[in-house]
Image (tube, rainbow, N blue to C red):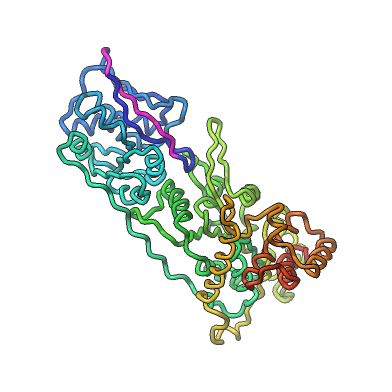
């Protein structure tokens, strides 16, 4: 008799249905798992055998074959233990075969039969909901999976609990969603002394999700400014929180099933590899750019990152998704993030201070910033020089607005953009607009057009640079509450586009 239990195999964020088909046949006693399993899946037979033995269930002296269908889809991970065990129990007649028809299960078995938490419960619950199935997962994953309200989630703590449920002795209660993770106290922008122009750039970047690079000498406050950017961003919407949490579920970053409404802030070290930044490695896991989806990716000391790592950012910045290519599969992850980068003007960091600069100035600055390629630099909407703060200013009282006041303006500007792009799939903020739509919503007045044309000709703006100025100008107009883009908005956007350290100003 053939017994089947449904589970999932992960392909990026997509959880694809897989059937664990078990059959007992005459022959020499053996236990085989086929269907393109990896090492962890192949070892499941030993964990299943030991878990059943702990429940005093002896395997018959027959040939046991478990096929994971479709057989040409790679199967990776330990979450196949539970569906293999359930299909085997159904083939043995211990649980009804029909009881598994409307369920999707995943979970790792320990040798004593306990269920160990696994990655990806949230995407699996999404697939179960789409198939109108019940999800069976370890108790530690139940709170996470229950966030998908369309799917019924059962969370046994052991294989014995699952058997008791399927045999009708002790039905399992539905799991309940975890608590919303409380937002951490954001750092206030008033802590930064001076740097009013940099604070304005952060406000514009937060309002329209515009990429920002800051260049300045050591200690000028670049990292301090970037760390306060999350305090300016609005909370994640329900859809954004679900998207972000699905990625974090695959990476094992959800804390006790709690989903956060705070936008992610990722700051990888400059020694990070390509796989760590864009994704890859064993199982093609999501990288930092995907973990920063709907949030901020902060790259400090940008020129110190390997050239190969920096160049891999160019396409994801434009498309909002990354494709991790393998010989047998292509895995896609979303990665719409706000990129904030910081860099010193040269290796010693004191290019603009004649008394402290090295003897190679100004060539050292050209060589150092030159590590950032022109195409990558062209993708930064806002380019900012951050001057050092005089020590005498550090004793002065805080200046400028608190983060809460700026965040309120950012939220208002985001609300305007949300209404503007309502009904347009994939468009949420001004940074997403392109083509005819961008020319329609960001068309400047006559004086603004003349100013932009003059600057484009004089400084050789690329077509990408021209459109990015329009996007920034549209965001500035939204912050100003203006229905149209006027010349002052264009002028301010241009001022953030030209950077002396980059040689464009």
Between residues 151 and 336, which one lies in front from this camera angle? 151
Between residues 86 and 220, which one lies in front from this camera angle? 86
Left/right placement of residue 342 relative to residue 357 reads left
Q: Which residues are magenta?
A: 15-26
How many marks overall? 0
Above or below residue 397? Residue 362 is above
Q: Does the magenta run of residues contain 364?
A: no
Q: Residue furthest top?
A: 27
Residue at position x 35%, y 47% in the image: 145
Residue at position x 55%, y 79% in the image: 401
Between residues 26 and 121, which one lies in front from this camera angle? 121
Residue at position x 23%, y 32% in the image: 50
x, y percentage for residue 408? 52, 73
Residue at position x 69%, y 57% in the image: 438
Above or below residue 32? Residue 477 is below
Quadrant that contains the N terminus: top left
Above or below residue 256? Residue 183 is below
Can I make out residue 309 in this image?
A: no
Q: Quadrant of residue 500?
A: bottom right
Above or below residue 480? Residue 13 is above
Can I make out residue 255 in this image?
A: yes
Q: Does the magenta run of residues contain 20?
A: yes
x, y percentage for residue 359? 75, 68
């Amino acid at each position: 008799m053939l017994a089947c239990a449904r589970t999932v195999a992960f392909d990026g964020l997509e959880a694809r249905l897989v059937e664990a088909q078990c059959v007992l046949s005459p022959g020499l006693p053996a236990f085989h798992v086929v269907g393109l399993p990896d090492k962890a899946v192949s070892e499941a037979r030993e964990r299943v055998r030991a878990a059943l033995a702990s429940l005093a269930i002896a395997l018959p002296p027959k040939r046991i074959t478990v096929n994971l269908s479709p057989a040409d889809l790679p199967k990776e991970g330990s979450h196949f233990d539970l569906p293999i065990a359930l299909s085997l129990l159904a083939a043995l007649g211990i649980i009804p075969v029909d009881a598994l028809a409307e369920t999707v299960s995943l979970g790792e078995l320990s040798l004593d039969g306990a269920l160990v938490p696994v990655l990806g419960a949230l995407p699996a619950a999404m697939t179960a909901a789409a198939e109108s199935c019940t999800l069976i997962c370890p108790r530690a994953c139940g709170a996470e999976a229950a966030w998908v309200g369309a799917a019924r989630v059962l969370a046994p703590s052991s294989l014995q609990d699952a058997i008791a449920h399927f045999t009708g002795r002790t039905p399992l209660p539905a799991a309940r969603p975890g608590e919303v993770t409380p937002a951490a106290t954001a750092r206030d922008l008033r802590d930064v002394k001076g740097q009013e122009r940099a604070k304005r750039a952060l406000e514009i970047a937060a309002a329209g999700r515009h990429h920002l690079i800051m260049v300045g000498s050591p200690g000028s406050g670049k990292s301090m400014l970037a760390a306060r950017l999350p305090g300016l961003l609005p909370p994640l919407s329900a859809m954004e929180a679900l998207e972000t949490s699905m990625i974090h579920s695959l990476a094992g970053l959800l804390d006790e099933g709690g989903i956060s409404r705070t936008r992610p802030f990722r700051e990888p070290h400059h020694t990070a590899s390509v796989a760590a930044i864009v994704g890859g490695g064993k199982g093609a896991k999501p990288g930092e750019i995907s973990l920063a989806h709907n949030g901020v990716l902060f790259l400090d000391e940008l020129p110190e990152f390997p050239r190969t790592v920096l160049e891999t950012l160019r396409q994801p910045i434009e498309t909002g998704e990354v494709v991790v290519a393998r010989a047998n599969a292509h895995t896609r992850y979303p990665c719409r993030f706000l990129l904030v980068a910081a860099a010193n003007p040269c290796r010693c960091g004191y290019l603009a201070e004649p008394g402290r600069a090295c003897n190679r100035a100004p060539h050292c600055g050209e060589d150092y910033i030159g590590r950032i390629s022109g195409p990558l630099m062209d993708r930064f909407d806002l380019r900012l020089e951050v001057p050092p703060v005089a020590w005498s200013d550090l004793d002065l009282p805080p200046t400028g607005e608190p983060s809460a006041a700026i965040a309120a303006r950012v939220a208002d500007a985001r609300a305007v953009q949300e209404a503007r792009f309502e009904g347009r799939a994939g468009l949420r903020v001004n940074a997403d607009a392109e083509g005819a739509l961008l020319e329609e919503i960001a068309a400047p007045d006559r004086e603004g057009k003349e100013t932009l044309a003059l600057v484009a000709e004089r400084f050789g703006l690329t077509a990408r640079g021209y459109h990015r100025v329009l996007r920034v100008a549209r965001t500035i107009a939204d912050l100003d509450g203006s229905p149209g883009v006027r010349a002052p908005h264009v002028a301010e956007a241009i001022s953030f586009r030209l950077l002396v350290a980059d040689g464009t100003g």
